[in-house]
Image: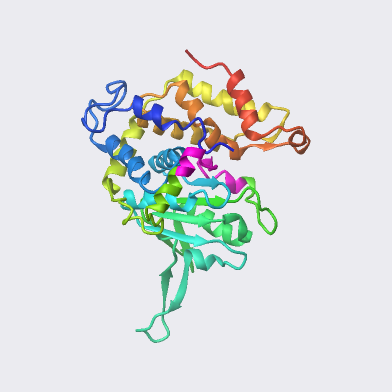
Amino acid sequence: MSNQPPEYDPTALSAAAADPSTGGAPPGAGRGGPAADDGSLAAMHALRGEVAKVVVGQEGTVSGLITALLVRGHVLLEGVPGVAKTLVVKALAHALDLDFSRVQFTPDLMPSDVTGQLVLAPDSAGGFRFREGPVFTNLFLADEINRTPPKTQAALLESMEERQVTAEGRSLALPDPFVVVATQNPVEQEGTYPLPEAQLDRFLFKLLVGYPSHDQEVDILERHDRGLDPHDIAAAGVSPVAGVADLAAARRNVESVTVERPVLDYMVAICRATRESPSTELGVSPRGASALLHAAKAWAWLSGRWYVSPDEVKAVAKPALRHRLLVRPEMELDGVTADGLLDSVLATVPAPR
């Protein structure tokens, strides 16, 4: 498994984006967007540099998480233990100055352990108050989400969809921003509760987090040899370089990115091709097409453009769609995968010029 999906090339992203040190307009400004950058683009790019102080070789994951934050999308990270999934999310939250909480999902975890519960109010005669659970935060990490029963999974996924928690008939709004990052191990499946397709569809992205390269792993060891403590992010030099205001400005800019009709047609053609493929039991739904649209707009803006081209659609197609496909079992036995099917679709569906 590659440590960094090729669709997330931070080097290419940096080359295409405005120089953060100048604060000037990004390439493409004036093509359907503001005349000049308001600083939010530079702030989003600065996040990667901060996270890199403590995490090596996961630039693609960081870029994917930032893209999801820009469109209020949730992310599913799949990777074996020990590849810095938790550390990436924790460092990003610190660099963006967001509240962060993490829950290790286990077979005995109850919904109230995540969302909260009514407790006896100490200063009232038999009264109760709602004690907020760890989901009341900005960036919530659901570690090994597939190790907890469906009832607890459903409680979290309801919060993801509605951005609120319902308790005793009352609806309590979650903070804004609110993004869930869930992790799962692709190897150990015994004793797990795989997320059903309807719940997987709630995630904007499924990112594959692989091993670092040889040189990157040497870099990791050298950092640890110099005394790096991955549990102390602040001591590692990671500091807030952006905040909620920067994120809000960035989101407004992403909404200003334009998409022409031929590109919309291209997105729909990709999604329809997955439904019509003889290799799939389940193709990409209209919800998935909408996710592709929003992700492409965010990726275009991060790349310094105020309009979406087919290149942005191709860049985000696999992480935005791979978890929305269900490959037929007999085709899986023949080696067909969701990523392979998407590669075939992207190679055959003609892109607009």
Furthest toward the top, the residue is: 353
| x and y percentages locating residue 106 in the rendered image | 59, 64
Q: Which residues are magenta?
A: 198-218
| x and y percentages locating residue 269 in the rendered image | 57, 23
The color scheme shown is: rainbow
Furthest toward the bottom, the residue is: 125
The answer to whether 250 is drawn above or below residue 275 in the figure is below
The answer to whether 84 is drawn above or below residue 123 in the figure is above
Depth order, front residue of 265/78: 78
| x and y percentages locating residue 115 in the rendered image | 48, 64
- Residue 246 is drawn in which quadrant? top left
Residue 209 highlighted magenta (yes or no): yes
Residue, x 44% and y 55% (percent of image)?
140
Tell me if residue 282 can be seen. yes
The answer to whether residue 70 is left or right of residue 18 is: right
Question: Quadrant of the image for the N terminus?
Answer: top right
Q: How many marks?
A: 0
Residue 45 highlighted magenta (yes or no): no
Residue, x 46% and y 60% (percent of image)?
102
| x and y percentages locating residue 339 in the rendered image | 61, 32
The answer to whether residue 311 is left or right of residue 306 is: right
The answer to whether 1 is drawn above or below residue 305 in the figure is below
Depth order, front residue of 142/238: 238
Depth order, front residue of 16/34: 16
Tell me if residue 213 can be seen. no
